Amino acid sequence: MLECRDDQTMIDKMQRPCSVFITFETEEGYNRAVNYNNTIKMKDFTKYKTFLYDEIEIKPASEPSDIIW
């Protein structure tokens, strides 16, 4: 159960995304995203490990041909 002190806090906790799909315009952007999990292990980049107090995990999406509909 979510413990909240006010209505706005409750709304903020309920609207937090759990996963997203991102598209990139360049190959460089894609490669940076793929390497993100290794980058945050470096001392200078650990501050980028979380977003809205939750850890971020980045992984490539499945190819459409790999999905069984």
Image (cartoon, grey):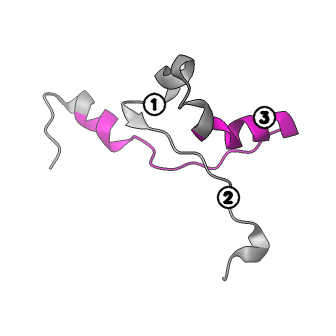
The answer to whether 19 is drawn above or below residue 51 in the figure is below
The tag earlier along the polypeptide, 1 or 3, is 3
Q: Amino acid at mark 2?
A: Ala
- For numbered disc 2, what is the local secondary structure? loop
At a point 58% along the width and 40% down the height, the residue shown is: 37
Left or right of 42 in this view: 67: right
68 and 9: which is toward the camera = 68
Q: Amino acid at mark 3?
A: Gly
Q: Quadrant of residue 4?
A: top left
Residue 57 percent coordinates (x, y): 52, 45
The quadrant in which the C terminus is found is bottom right
At a point 69% along the width and 43% down the height, the residue shown is: 34
Is residue 26 among the parts visible in the rendering?
no
Is residue 28 rendered magenta in the image? yes
> How many residues crowd mark 1 within 10 Å: few (<14), some (14–19), many (20+)?
few
Mark 1 vs 2: CB contact within 8 A: no
Structural distance between the alpha carbons of marks 2 and 3: 15 Å
Q: Which residues are magenta?
A: 10-37
Q: Quadrant of residue 55?
A: top left
Is residue 5 rendered magenta in the image? no
> How many residues crowd mark 3 within 10 Å: few (<14), some (14–19), many (20+)?
few
- Residue furthest to the top in view is 44
> How many residues crowd mark 2 within 10 Å: few (<14), some (14–19), many (20+)?
few
| Residue that carries the numbered disc 3 in the rendered image | 29
The tag earlier along the polypeptide, 2 or 3, is 3
- Specify the label residue 27 is tagged with: none
| Residue that carries the numbered disc 1 in the rendered image | 51
- For numbered disc 1, what is the local secondary structure? strand
- Residue furthest to the right in view is 26
Q: Amino acid at mark 1?
A: Phe
At a point 78% along the width and 34% down the height, the residue shown is: 29
Mark 2 vs 3: CB contact within 8 A: no
